Amino acid sequence: MNSVVAERTFVRSDLVILGGGAVAVILAAVTHFVGAGAVIPFVCSAAAVTLLASLVGRSVEQLGDRFGPGATGVLQSALGNLPELFIALFALKAGLVAVVQAALIGSILANLLLVLGLAFLVGGLKHGTQQLDSERARSIIVLMVLSVAAMVVPSLAFYVHTPAEKHESTLSIIVSVVLLVLFALTLPASLRKQQRAGESGAEQEATESEAPRWPLWLAVGLLALAAIAAAFVSDWFVVALEPAMEALNISEAFAGLVVVAIAGNAIENVVGVQLAAAGRSEYAFSVVINSPMQIALVLAPLLVILSQVFGFATLTLVFPPMLVVAVVIAVILTAFITFDGESTWIEGAALIAVYIVIAASFWWG
């Protein structure tokens, strides 16, 4: 009887995430405290961060719509960035400001170019031209463009030598507060919405027919456990990052832009592509685009303020010029491709190609 209940509660993918996550955390702990060279601790902690991020996503998914579709979507977005938040805070504590700045921009680039490109590529090859023509999809892309634009204004003010150049820290805090207020203003609309972001009525009906397998106590318990474990593992990840960069001859910029960004965005990397493969293009688009929007609206501003509150290395919104150019290119390309209301696999391949070119340009720093 117990085996039947367990079988109904956990599917194979659940067991892979739970078992793999437990093994990865144990290996990360052993290699951190005992020592295993410069690269192995980094690989183990990176794997642990990725699997814990997946467990956070699965736990929120199993909460279903118990708190309402809108609240569940907001919860998924907020908690999905927990690993990135922890990694960034420990990196700032260690003085790795360049890594954090590259990771913030890298997370936006990874979602807008790599993950969205993979979703368009996989979905397009399997289902042909994908439709994104919904009011919600357009509103998400507009808000994402506006939030990223506001985030890079301090960089523009600094590099064109305006009077604000000497007050980059103050300007960054002002912009951060404005972005957080903007997020707060958009929150009620997200909580009230009746459908999941970007999901058509048919898609929503199909999703709601799949009742959550986990009881509420289990979903909340595993969510809390994953969050606590992520805090510890993020610290080990940052400790292992510097020796690994030296051993592998990887620059801080490339480590933040690619390695940290992809490890911290495991949820969107997997879920967005899976949804596109299943033919749920609008929902996939919403999941992928929502992450960079949350980074610009919440994560980056929050880190700017917390770096001041905790007395860590000061983080400002003045990014290196190449990072600013890269994120502007990504935002313009994404808006241009999606505003016609449809996507093809060729557009997906082009986005991936642009990501590879940008990532390669940061290999040397």
Image (cartoon, rainbow, N blue to C red):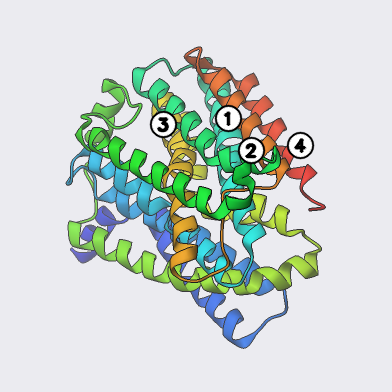
In primary-sequence order, the first of circles 4 and 3 is 3
Place of residue 263 in the rendered image (x, y in percent of width and height, measured from the top left): 56, 55
- Which amino acid type is marked by label 1? Val
Labels 4 and 1: the sequence-earlier one: 1
Q: Residue at label 3?
A: 286
Does any portion of residue 35 appear in the rendered image?
A: yes
Q: Is residue 139 above or below residue 324?
A: above
Residue 241: x and y, percent? 66, 68
Q: Quadrant of residue 191?
A: top left
Q: Which amino acid, by three-letter code, is at mark 4?
A: Val
Labels 3 and 2 touching (C-beta < 8 A): no
Q: Earlier in the sequence, mark 3 or mark 2?
A: 2
Residue for badge 2: 156
Indicate which disc, 4 or 2, sits on the residue closer to the N terminus: 2
From the image, state whether disc 4 or disc 2 is nearer to you: 2
The relative height of residue 103 versus residue 132 in the rendered view (above or below) is below
From the viewer's side, name the closer residue of 256 and 342.
256
| Left or right, 258 with reference to 197 | right
Q: Amino acid at mark 2?
A: Leu
Q: CA distance from mark 4 to mark 2?
A: 23 Å
| Residue under label 4 | 357
The residue nearer to you, when weighing 196 against 180, is 180
Tell me residue 50's x, y (percent).
52, 58
Q: Secondary structure at mark 4?
A: helix
Residue 57 at what x, y percent from top left?
38, 51
Q: Which residue is mark 1?
A: 331
> Toward which corner of the image does residue 344 lie, by quadrant?
top right
Calculate the distance from the C-alpha at mark 3 to the C-alpha at mark 2.
29 Å
Give neighbour class at mark 3: few <14, some 14-19, many 20+ (Cα, 10 Å): many
Q: Secondary structure at mark 1?
A: helix
